[in-house]
Protein backbone atom coordinates (compact mmCIF):
# COMPACT_ATOMS: atom_id res chain seq x y z
CA UNK A 1 0.00 0.00 0.00
CA UNK A 2 1.30 3.43 -0.85
CA UNK A 3 1.55 6.22 1.66
CA UNK A 4 1.27 9.91 0.95
CA UNK A 5 5.03 10.38 0.69
CA UNK A 6 5.77 7.49 -1.62
CA UNK A 7 6.31 4.82 1.04
CA UNK A 8 5.17 1.42 -0.07
CA UNK A 9 4.94 -1.44 2.35
CA UNK A 10 5.01 -5.03 1.19
CA UNK A 11 1.62 -6.12 2.50
CA UNK A 12 -0.59 -8.15 0.20
CA UNK A 13 -4.25 -7.31 -0.20
CA UNK A 14 -5.12 -10.69 1.30
CA UNK A 15 -3.09 -9.80 4.41
CA UNK A 16 -5.01 -6.58 4.70
CA UNK A 17 -8.28 -8.49 4.46
CA UNK A 18 -7.19 -11.10 7.00
CA UNK A 19 -6.28 -8.49 9.60
CA UNK A 20 -9.78 -7.00 9.28
CA UNK A 21 -11.41 -10.42 9.60
CA UNK A 22 -9.26 -11.80 12.39
CA UNK A 23 -11.30 -10.32 15.21
CA UNK A 24 -14.54 -9.92 13.33
CA UNK A 25 -15.53 -13.40 12.18
CA UNK A 26 -14.12 -15.82 14.73
CA UNK A 27 -16.97 -18.23 15.62
CA UNK A 28 -16.81 -17.12 19.26
CA UNK A 29 -17.22 -13.37 19.59
CA UNK A 30 -14.73 -11.32 21.57
CA UNK A 31 -16.42 -10.10 24.74
CA UNK A 32 -15.25 -7.49 27.17
CA UNK A 33 -14.44 -9.13 30.50
CA UNK A 34 -15.25 -7.49 33.79
CA UNK A 35 -12.64 -6.84 36.44
CA UNK A 36 -14.36 -9.03 39.01
CA UNK A 37 -15.67 -11.83 36.81
CA UNK A 38 -19.15 -11.82 38.30
CA UNK A 39 -18.26 -13.52 41.58
CA UNK A 40 -19.95 -16.83 40.73
CA UNK A 41 -18.43 -20.23 40.18
CA UNK A 42 -18.09 -19.67 36.46
CA UNK A 43 -16.61 -16.18 36.59
CA UNK A 44 -13.14 -16.00 35.10
CA UNK A 45 -12.07 -12.74 36.70
CA UNK A 46 -10.02 -11.18 33.90
CA UNK A 47 -9.12 -7.55 34.43
CA UNK A 48 -9.31 -6.36 30.84
CA UNK A 49 -10.01 -3.06 29.15
CA UNK A 50 -7.60 -0.76 30.95
CA UNK A 51 -8.16 2.23 33.18
CA UNK A 52 -11.40 4.15 32.82
CA UNK A 53 -11.22 7.80 31.95
CA UNK A 54 -9.74 10.29 29.54
CA UNK A 55 -6.11 10.35 28.50
CA UNK A 56 -3.59 8.33 26.50
CA UNK A 57 -3.12 4.64 25.84
CA UNK A 58 0.13 3.47 24.22
CA UNK A 59 0.69 -0.14 23.21
CA UNK A 60 0.77 -2.63 20.34
CA UNK A 61 -2.25 -2.89 18.07
CA UNK A 62 -3.97 -6.24 18.64
CA UNK A 63 -6.89 -6.02 16.21
CA UNK A 64 -9.05 -4.01 13.86
CA UNK A 65 -12.64 -3.13 13.08
CA UNK A 66 -11.84 0.07 14.95
CA UNK A 67 -8.45 -0.20 16.70
CA UNK A 68 -7.70 -2.46 19.65
CA UNK A 69 -4.92 -1.17 21.94
CA UNK A 70 -4.22 -2.28 25.52
CA UNK A 71 -7.43 -4.31 25.60
CA UNK A 72 -9.70 -1.41 24.60
CA UNK A 73 -11.68 -1.25 21.37
CA UNK A 74 -11.28 2.37 20.28
CA UNK A 75 -13.79 3.67 17.74
CA UNK A 76 -12.03 5.91 15.23
CA UNK A 77 -14.97 7.33 13.27
CA UNK A 78 -14.59 10.76 14.90
CA UNK A 79 -11.09 11.18 13.42
CA UNK A 80 -11.15 12.86 10.01
CA UNK A 81 -10.34 10.17 7.42
CA UNK A 82 -9.18 8.01 10.37
CA UNK A 83 -5.85 9.77 9.98
CA UNK A 84 -2.74 8.50 11.78
CA UNK A 85 -0.33 11.27 12.82
CA UNK A 86 3.15 10.22 11.67
CA UNK A 87 6.00 11.06 9.31
CA UNK A 88 6.59 7.47 8.23
CA UNK A 89 4.31 7.23 5.21
CA UNK A 90 1.15 5.95 6.89
CA UNK A 91 -1.97 7.85 5.89
CA UNK A 92 -4.78 6.25 7.89
CA UNK A 93 -5.90 3.43 10.16
CA UNK A 94 -5.94 1.15 7.09
CA UNK A 95 -2.13 1.36 6.93
CA UNK A 96 -1.64 0.10 10.48
CA UNK A 97 -0.65 -3.49 11.23
CA UNK A 98 -0.98 -5.66 14.29
CA UNK A 99 2.03 -5.22 16.55
CA UNK A 100 2.64 -1.58 15.65
CA UNK A 101 3.02 0.44 18.86
CA UNK A 102 0.30 3.08 18.64
CA UNK A 103 -0.56 6.04 20.85
CA UNK A 104 -4.28 6.66 21.20
CA UNK A 105 -5.62 9.84 22.77
CA UNK A 106 -9.25 9.66 23.77
CA UNK A 107 -11.63 8.33 26.37
CA UNK A 108 -12.68 4.83 27.38
CA UNK A 109 -15.39 3.21 29.43
CA UNK A 110 -15.67 0.43 32.03
CA UNK A 111 -16.99 -1.96 29.36
CA UNK A 112 -13.66 -1.84 27.49
CA UNK A 113 -14.84 0.32 24.61
CA UNK A 114 -13.55 3.78 23.86
CA UNK A 115 -13.50 6.67 21.45
CA UNK A 116 -10.24 7.83 19.90
CA UNK A 117 -9.60 11.52 19.36
CA UNK A 118 -6.24 10.97 17.66
CA UNK A 119 -3.87 8.18 16.61
CA UNK A 120 -0.09 8.62 16.57
CA UNK A 121 2.57 6.24 15.23
CA UNK A 122 6.34 6.45 14.81
CA UNK A 123 8.78 3.87 13.42
CA UNK A 124 11.55 3.00 15.85
CA UNK A 125 13.82 1.89 13.00
CA UNK A 126 13.66 1.96 9.23
CA UNK A 127 16.49 0.52 7.19
CA UNK A 128 18.07 -2.76 6.11
CA UNK A 129 18.15 -5.86 8.32
CA UNK A 130 21.60 -7.40 8.81
CA UNK A 131 23.37 -9.99 10.96
CA UNK A 132 20.22 -12.09 11.38
CA UNK A 133 20.68 -14.85 13.95
CA UNK A 134 17.97 -17.39 14.81
CA UNK A 135 18.29 -18.67 18.38
CA UNK A 136 15.08 -20.69 18.70
CA UNK A 137 12.90 -22.54 16.20
CA UNK A 138 9.41 -23.95 16.59
CA UNK A 139 8.32 -27.56 16.08
CA UNK A 140 8.28 -27.07 12.30
CA UNK A 141 11.79 -25.59 12.24
CA UNK A 142 10.64 -22.02 11.56
CA UNK A 143 12.35 -19.15 13.44
CA UNK A 144 10.75 -18.40 16.78
CA UNK A 145 13.29 -16.07 18.38
CA UNK A 146 16.54 -14.38 17.47
CA UNK A 147 18.32 -11.11 16.83
CA UNK A 148 19.33 -8.86 13.95
CA UNK A 149 20.62 -5.33 13.50
CA UNK A 150 19.52 -2.19 11.69
CA UNK A 151 22.14 0.55 11.26
CA UNK A 152 24.24 -1.07 13.96
CA UNK A 153 21.52 -1.34 16.64
CA UNK A 154 20.66 -4.82 17.94
CA UNK A 155 16.99 -5.83 17.83
CA UNK A 156 15.50 -9.05 19.16
CA UNK A 157 12.36 -10.83 17.98
CA UNK A 158 10.30 -13.56 19.61
CA UNK A 159 6.90 -15.22 19.39
CA UNK A 160 5.24 -11.98 20.44
CA UNK A 161 6.68 -10.17 17.39
CA UNK A 162 4.34 -9.70 14.43
CA UNK A 163 6.45 -10.29 11.30
CA UNK A 164 5.31 -9.30 7.80
CA UNK A 165 7.70 -10.40 5.04
CA UNK A 166 7.11 -10.93 1.32
CA UNK A 167 8.23 -14.54 1.63
CA UNK A 168 7.70 -17.06 4.40
CA UNK A 169 10.02 -16.56 7.37
CA UNK A 170 11.50 -20.03 6.99
CA UNK A 171 15.05 -19.16 8.04
CA UNK A 172 17.40 -16.23 8.62
CA UNK A 173 17.83 -15.59 4.90
CA UNK A 174 14.19 -14.48 4.61
CA UNK A 175 15.00 -11.41 6.72
CA UNK A 176 18.68 -10.81 5.92
CA UNK A 177 19.18 -7.79 3.66
CA UNK A 178 15.51 -6.83 3.58
CA UNK A 179 14.33 -3.24 3.87
CA UNK A 180 12.17 -3.13 6.99
CA UNK A 181 10.30 -0.88 9.37
CA UNK A 182 10.46 -1.77 13.05
CA UNK A 183 8.21 -0.85 15.95
CA UNK A 184 10.07 -1.76 19.14
CA UNK A 185 10.59 -1.24 22.85
CA UNK A 186 13.97 -0.38 24.40
CA UNK A 187 15.44 -3.38 26.20
CA UNK A 188 18.67 -2.65 28.04
CA UNK A 189 21.27 -1.73 25.44
CA UNK A 190 19.18 -3.18 22.61
CA UNK A 191 15.56 -3.24 21.43
CA UNK A 192 12.72 -5.75 21.43
CA UNK A 193 10.59 -5.77 18.28
CA UNK A 194 6.82 -5.74 18.50
CA UNK A 195 6.46 -5.43 14.71
CA UNK A 196 8.73 -6.11 11.72
CA UNK A 197 7.41 -5.23 8.27
CA UNK A 198 9.17 -5.50 4.92
CA UNK A 199 9.21 -2.42 2.68
CA UNK A 200 9.48 -2.38 -1.09
CA UNK A 201 11.50 0.83 -1.11
CA UNK A 202 13.18 3.45 1.05
CA UNK A 203 12.28 6.66 -0.82
CA UNK A 204 15.24 9.04 -1.07
CA UNK A 205 17.17 6.49 1.01
CA UNK A 206 15.48 7.89 4.11
CA UNK A 207 16.20 5.78 7.19
CA UNK A 208 15.27 6.09 10.85
CA UNK A 209 17.47 5.21 13.79
CA UNK A 210 17.14 5.34 17.56
CA UNK A 211 19.75 4.90 20.26
CA UNK A 212 22.15 6.57 22.63
CA UNK A 213 23.53 9.65 20.88
CA UNK A 214 26.94 11.03 21.79
CA UNK A 215 29.57 13.33 20.37
CA UNK A 216 33.05 12.01 19.66
CA UNK A 217 35.66 14.38 18.21
CA UNK A 218 32.86 16.56 16.90
CA UNK A 219 30.97 13.71 15.23
CA UNK A 220 27.47 12.68 16.32
CA UNK A 221 27.28 8.91 16.75
CA UNK A 222 24.64 6.34 17.65
CA UNK A 223 26.69 3.28 18.42
CA UNK A 224 29.20 3.26 15.59
CA UNK A 225 26.86 4.91 13.08
CA UNK A 226 28.15 8.34 12.07
CA UNK A 227 25.57 11.11 11.57
CA UNK A 228 26.20 14.41 9.79
CA UNK A 229 24.36 17.34 11.39
CA UNK A 230 23.94 20.02 8.68
CA UNK A 231 22.77 22.69 11.14
CA UNK A 232 20.83 23.44 14.30
CA UNK A 233 17.58 23.54 12.33
CA UNK A 234 17.43 19.73 12.25
CA UNK A 235 16.93 19.54 16.02
CA UNK A 236 13.27 19.24 17.02
CA UNK A 237 10.93 18.87 20.01
CA UNK A 238 13.18 20.88 22.32
CA UNK A 239 16.34 18.85 21.73
CA UNK A 240 19.62 20.70 21.21
CA UNK A 241 23.16 19.63 20.42
CA UNK A 242 24.23 20.77 23.88
CA UNK A 243 21.58 18.56 25.49
CA UNK A 244 23.12 15.47 23.90
CA UNK A 245 26.62 16.41 25.05
CA UNK A 246 29.38 13.96 25.75
CA UNK A 247 27.41 11.86 28.24
CA UNK A 248 24.79 10.92 25.70
CA UNK A 249 21.01 10.84 25.43
CA UNK A 250 18.67 8.46 23.62
CA UNK A 251 17.65 10.19 20.42
CA UNK A 252 15.83 9.52 17.18
CA UNK A 253 17.41 10.44 13.85
CA UNK A 254 15.78 10.46 10.44
CA UNK A 255 17.89 11.20 7.40
CA UNK A 256 19.43 10.18 4.10
CA UNK A 257 21.73 7.16 4.16
CA UNK A 258 24.48 6.81 1.57
CA UNK A 259 25.49 3.32 2.64
CA UNK A 260 27.89 4.55 5.31
CA UNK A 261 26.80 7.89 6.78
CA UNK A 262 23.41 9.39 7.66
CA UNK A 263 22.81 13.05 6.84
CA UNK A 264 20.20 14.09 9.37
CA UNK A 265 16.93 15.76 8.42
CA UNK A 266 15.48 15.66 11.93
CA UNK A 267 16.95 14.81 15.33
CA UNK A 268 14.56 14.62 18.27
CA UNK A 269 14.25 12.84 21.62
CA UNK A 270 13.69 9.10 21.33
CA UNK A 271 10.30 7.40 21.40
CA UNK A 272 10.18 7.79 25.20
CA UNK A 273 8.26 11.00 24.58
CA UNK A 274 5.29 9.04 23.19
CA UNK A 275 4.83 7.31 26.54
CA UNK A 276 4.45 10.53 28.49
CA UNK A 277 1.09 12.09 29.27
CA UNK A 278 -0.44 15.45 30.05
CA UNK A 279 -0.41 16.54 33.68
CA UNK A 280 -3.17 14.78 35.63
CA UNK A 281 -4.47 12.64 32.78
CA UNK A 282 -5.14 8.91 32.87
CA UNK A 283 -2.46 6.93 31.06
CA UNK A 284 -1.83 3.31 30.19
CA UNK A 285 1.35 2.04 28.57
CA UNK A 286 2.82 -1.31 27.60
CA UNK A 287 6.58 -1.67 27.56
CA UNK A 288 9.79 -2.95 29.11
CA UNK A 289 10.98 -2.42 32.68
CA UNK A 290 14.34 -0.84 33.49
CA UNK A 291 16.05 0.54 36.58
CA UNK A 292 14.17 -1.76 38.95
CA UNK A 293 15.44 -2.68 42.41
CA UNK A 294 13.28 -4.56 44.96
CA UNK A 295 13.22 -1.82 47.61
CA UNK A 296 12.85 1.11 45.23
CA UNK A 297 9.59 3.05 45.10
CA UNK A 298 9.96 3.66 41.38
CA UNK A 299 11.32 2.22 38.15
CA UNK A 300 11.08 2.99 34.43
CA UNK A 301 8.94 1.65 31.61
CA UNK A 302 10.10 2.67 28.13
CA UNK A 303 12.20 5.35 29.79
CA UNK A 304 9.26 6.93 31.65
CA UNK A 305 9.37 7.00 35.47
CA UNK A 306 6.75 4.85 37.22
CA UNK A 307 6.01 5.43 40.90
CA UNK A 308 4.71 2.62 43.14
CA UNK A 309 2.49 3.42 46.13
CA UNK A 310 0.77 1.34 48.80
CA UNK A 311 -2.34 1.41 46.59
CA UNK A 312 -0.60 -0.03 43.51
CA UNK A 313 -2.01 -3.43 42.53
CA UNK A 314 0.19 -6.09 40.91
CA UNK A 315 -1.63 -8.43 38.53
CA UNK A 316 -0.14 -11.87 37.67
CA UNK A 317 3.09 -11.14 39.51
CA UNK A 318 4.39 -10.02 42.87
CA UNK A 319 6.31 -6.79 43.19
CA UNK A 320 9.56 -8.66 43.91
CA UNK A 321 9.14 -10.63 40.67
CA UNK A 322 9.64 -7.54 38.53
CA UNK A 323 12.89 -7.65 36.55
CA UNK A 324 14.58 -5.40 34.04
CA UNK A 325 13.47 -6.01 30.42
CA UNK A 326 10.21 -7.66 31.56
CA UNK A 327 7.20 -6.64 29.46
CA UNK A 328 4.44 -5.09 31.57
CA UNK A 329 1.35 -2.93 31.24
CA UNK A 330 1.08 0.02 33.62
CA UNK A 331 -2.08 1.97 34.39
CA UNK A 332 -2.15 5.18 36.38
CA UNK A 333 -2.14 8.97 36.46
CA UNK A 334 0.55 11.19 34.95
CA UNK A 335 1.83 13.63 37.58
CA UNK A 336 4.98 15.78 37.54
CA UNK A 337 6.53 13.73 34.74
CA UNK A 338 5.84 10.40 36.46
CA UNK A 339 3.18 7.71 36.07
CA UNK A 340 1.72 7.08 39.53
CA UNK A 341 0.78 3.43 39.06
CA UNK A 342 -2.66 2.13 39.97
CA UNK A 343 -1.92 -1.29 38.48
CA UNK A 344 1.10 -3.11 37.08
CA UNK A 345 0.19 -6.15 34.99
CA UNK A 346 2.42 -8.86 33.58
CA UNK A 347 2.41 -8.82 29.77
CA UNK A 348 4.93 -11.62 29.27
CA UNK A 349 3.69 -15.08 28.40
CA UNK A 350 4.40 -17.70 31.07
CA UNK A 351 2.61 -20.67 29.51
CA UNK A 352 2.09 -22.22 26.07
CA UNK A 353 0.11 -24.88 24.27
CA UNK A 354 0.45 -26.21 20.73
CA UNK A 355 -2.32 -28.62 19.76
CA UNK A 356 -5.50 -29.17 17.77
CA UNK A 357 -8.57 -27.07 18.44
CA UNK A 358 -11.07 -29.53 19.93
CA UNK A 359 -14.22 -27.48 20.55
CA UNK A 360 -15.54 -24.24 22.00
CA UNK A 361 -14.46 -23.89 25.63
CA UNK A 362 -16.50 -23.80 28.83
CA UNK A 363 -15.81 -20.09 29.36
CA UNK A 364 -17.00 -17.12 27.29
CA UNK A 365 -14.79 -16.45 24.27
CA UNK A 366 -12.73 -19.57 24.83
CA UNK A 367 -11.58 -22.69 23.02
CA UNK A 368 -10.53 -26.14 24.16
CA UNK A 369 -7.10 -26.52 22.53
CA UNK A 370 -5.54 -29.90 23.25
CA UNK A 371 -7.53 -30.05 26.49
CA UNK A 372 -6.33 -26.62 27.70
CA UNK A 373 -8.98 -23.90 28.02
CA UNK A 374 -7.71 -20.87 26.10
CA UNK A 375 -9.50 -17.55 26.61
CA UNK A 376 -9.33 -14.84 23.94
CA UNK A 377 -9.43 -11.16 24.92
CA UNK A 378 -9.21 -7.80 23.20
CA UNK A 379 -5.43 -7.96 23.74
CA UNK A 380 -5.01 -11.27 21.90
CA UNK A 381 -3.13 -11.04 18.59
CA UNK A 382 -4.37 -13.75 16.22
CA UNK A 383 -2.47 -14.72 13.09
CA UNK A 384 -3.82 -17.07 10.41
CA UNK A 385 -2.11 -19.30 7.87
CA UNK A 386 -2.99 -18.61 4.24
CA UNK A 387 -6.45 -19.95 3.48
CA UNK A 388 -7.70 -19.64 7.08
CA UNK A 389 -9.70 -16.79 8.53
CA UNK A 390 -11.17 -18.16 11.75
CA UNK A 391 -10.60 -20.52 14.65
CA UNK A 392 -12.65 -23.70 14.41
CA UNK A 393 -12.47 -27.34 15.51
CA UNK A 394 -9.96 -29.35 13.50
CA UNK A 395 -7.34 -26.67 12.89
CA UNK A 396 -4.14 -26.43 14.92
CA UNK A 397 -3.21 -23.52 17.15
CA UNK A 398 -0.01 -22.40 18.83
CA UNK A 399 -0.80 -20.22 21.84
CA UNK A 400 1.37 -18.17 24.18
CA UNK A 401 -0.27 -16.52 27.14
CA UNK A 402 -0.65 -16.03 30.86
CA UNK A 403 -1.77 -18.84 33.17
CA UNK A 404 -4.70 -17.64 35.27
CA UNK A 405 -7.09 -19.07 37.83
CA UNK A 406 -10.77 -18.12 37.59
CA UNK A 407 -13.16 -17.39 40.41
CA UNK A 408 -14.24 -21.05 40.22
CA UNK A 409 -10.69 -22.17 41.05
CA UNK A 410 -10.12 -23.63 37.58
CA UNK A 411 -7.03 -22.79 35.54
CA UNK A 412 -7.13 -21.38 32.03
CA UNK A 413 -4.68 -19.79 29.59
CA UNK A 414 -5.33 -16.16 28.68
CA UNK A 415 -3.97 -15.87 25.16
CA UNK A 416 -1.54 -13.13 24.19
CA UNK A 417 -0.77 -14.58 20.76
CA UNK A 418 -2.49 -17.30 18.73
CA UNK A 419 -1.10 -18.74 15.50
CA UNK A 420 -3.76 -20.73 13.65
CA UNK A 421 -2.45 -23.34 11.21
CA UNK A 422 -4.01 -25.83 8.83
CA UNK A 423 -1.38 -28.52 9.50
CA UNK A 424 -2.77 -31.15 11.86
CA UNK A 425 -0.58 -33.14 14.25
CA UNK A 426 -1.54 -35.84 16.73
CA UNK A 427 1.40 -34.84 18.94
CA UNK A 428 0.70 -31.99 21.31
CA UNK A 429 2.95 -29.78 23.47
CA UNK A 430 2.38 -27.53 26.44
CA UNK A 431 4.45 -25.52 28.91
CA UNK A 432 3.04 -24.51 32.27
CA UNK A 433 3.11 -24.76 36.03
CA UNK A 434 2.71 -28.26 37.44
CA UNK A 435 -0.01 -28.45 40.10
CA UNK A 436 1.74 -29.87 43.17
CA UNK A 437 -1.54 -29.87 45.11
CA UNK A 438 -3.07 -32.38 42.68
CA UNK A 439 -3.13 -35.89 44.20
CA UNK A 440 -4.58 -38.03 41.42
CA UNK A 441 -3.00 -41.46 41.00
CA UNK A 442 -0.95 -42.16 37.87
CA UNK A 443 -1.52 -38.68 36.48
CA UNK A 444 -0.34 -35.06 36.68
CA UNK A 445 -2.06 -31.72 36.25
CA UNK A 446 -0.54 -28.90 34.19
CA UNK A 447 -2.35 -25.77 32.96
CA UNK A 448 -5.56 -27.20 34.37
CA UNK A 449 -5.23 -30.33 32.24
CA UNK A 450 -5.07 -33.79 33.84
CA UNK A 451 -2.90 -36.26 31.90
CA UNK A 452 -2.06 -39.93 32.42
CA UNK A 453 1.62 -40.13 33.34
CA UNK A 454 4.20 -42.87 33.87
CA UNK A 455 7.22 -40.56 33.48
CA UNK A 456 9.35 -39.41 36.45
CA UNK A 457 8.05 -36.04 37.65
CA UNK A 458 10.91 -33.48 37.62
CA UNK A 459 11.59 -31.29 40.64
CA UNK A 460 10.72 -27.91 39.13
CA UNK A 461 7.75 -25.56 38.96
CA UNK A 462 7.44 -25.08 35.20
CA UNK A 463 7.42 -28.15 32.95
CA UNK A 464 7.34 -28.90 29.25
CA UNK A 465 5.02 -31.73 28.28
CA UNK A 466 4.73 -33.62 25.01
CA UNK A 467 1.48 -35.55 25.02
CA UNK A 468 -1.04 -37.50 22.96
CA UNK A 469 -4.79 -37.99 23.02
CA UNK A 470 -5.89 -41.18 24.78
CA UNK A 471 -5.74 -42.94 28.15
CA UNK A 472 -8.17 -42.81 31.03
CA UNK A 473 -8.00 -39.02 31.38
CA UNK A 474 -8.20 -38.34 27.65
CA UNK A 475 -4.52 -37.41 27.37
CA UNK A 476 -1.24 -39.28 27.92
CA UNK A 477 2.19 -37.82 28.68
CA UNK A 478 4.83 -38.88 26.16
CA UNK A 479 7.74 -36.77 27.47
CA UNK A 480 8.05 -34.63 30.60
CA UNK A 481 10.89 -32.30 31.57
CA UNK A 482 11.67 -29.00 33.23
CA UNK A 483 11.18 -25.93 31.08
CA UNK A 484 14.50 -24.56 29.83
CA UNK A 485 14.22 -21.28 31.74
CA UNK A 486 12.99 -22.80 35.02
CA UNK A 487 15.81 -23.13 37.52
CA UNK A 488 13.68 -23.81 40.59
Image (tube, helix red, strand yellow):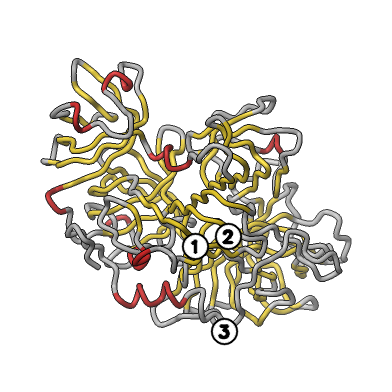
Number of numbered callouts drawn: 3
Place residue 164 in its image quadrant. Answer: bottom left
**Residue 169 can be seen in this image:** no
Q: Are marks 1 and 2 in contact (CB under 8 Å)?
A: yes
Per the model, the C-alpha gap separating discs 2 and 3 is 28 Å
Q: Which mark is residue 62?
A: 1
Q: Residue at x 11, y 41 (%)?
A: 258
Callout 3: few (<14), some (14-19), or many (20+) C-alpha neighbours within 10 Å? some
Q: Residue at x 69, y 70 (%)?
A: 373
Vertical arrangement, residue 168 with respect to residue 221, above or below: below
**Residue 124 can be seen in this image:** yes
Q: Residue at x 44, y 65 (%)?
A: 78
**Mark 2 vs 3, N-terminal side:** 2
Callout 2: few (<14), some (14-19), or many (20+) C-alpha neighbours within 10 Å? many
Vertical arrangement, residue 253 with respect to residue 399, above or below: above
Q: Are marks 1 and 3 in contact (CB under 8 Å)?
A: no
Q: Position of residue 259 (x, y in %)?
A: 13, 41
**Mark 1 vs 3, N-terminal side:** 1
Per the model, the C-alpha gap separating discs 1 and 3 is 24 Å
Decide if residue 129 is on the left or right side of residue 393.
left
Place residue 453 in its image quadrant. Answer: bottom right
The residue lying toward the viewer, choosing from 140 and 46, is 46
Q: Quadrant of the C terminus?
A: top right
Per the model, the C-alpha gap separating discs 1 and 2 is 8 Å
Mark 2 lies on residue: 71
**Mark 1 vs 2, N-terminal side:** 1
Q: Which mark is residue 394?
A: 3
Amino acid sequence: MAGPDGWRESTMTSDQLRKRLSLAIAPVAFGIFSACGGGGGGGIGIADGGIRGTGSSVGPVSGFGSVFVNGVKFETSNILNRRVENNDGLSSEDDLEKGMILRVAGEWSPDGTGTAESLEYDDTFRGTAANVSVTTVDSSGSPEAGTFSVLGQTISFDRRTVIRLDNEFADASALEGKRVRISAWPSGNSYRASYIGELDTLPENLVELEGLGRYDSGDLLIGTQRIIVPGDSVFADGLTADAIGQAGQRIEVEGEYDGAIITARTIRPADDRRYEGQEGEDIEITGTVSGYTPRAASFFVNGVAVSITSDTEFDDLDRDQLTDNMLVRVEGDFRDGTIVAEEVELFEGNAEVEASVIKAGRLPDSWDIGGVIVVLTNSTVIEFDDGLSSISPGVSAEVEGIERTGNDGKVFLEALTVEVESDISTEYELTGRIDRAYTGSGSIKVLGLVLDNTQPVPDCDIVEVEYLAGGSTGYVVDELECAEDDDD
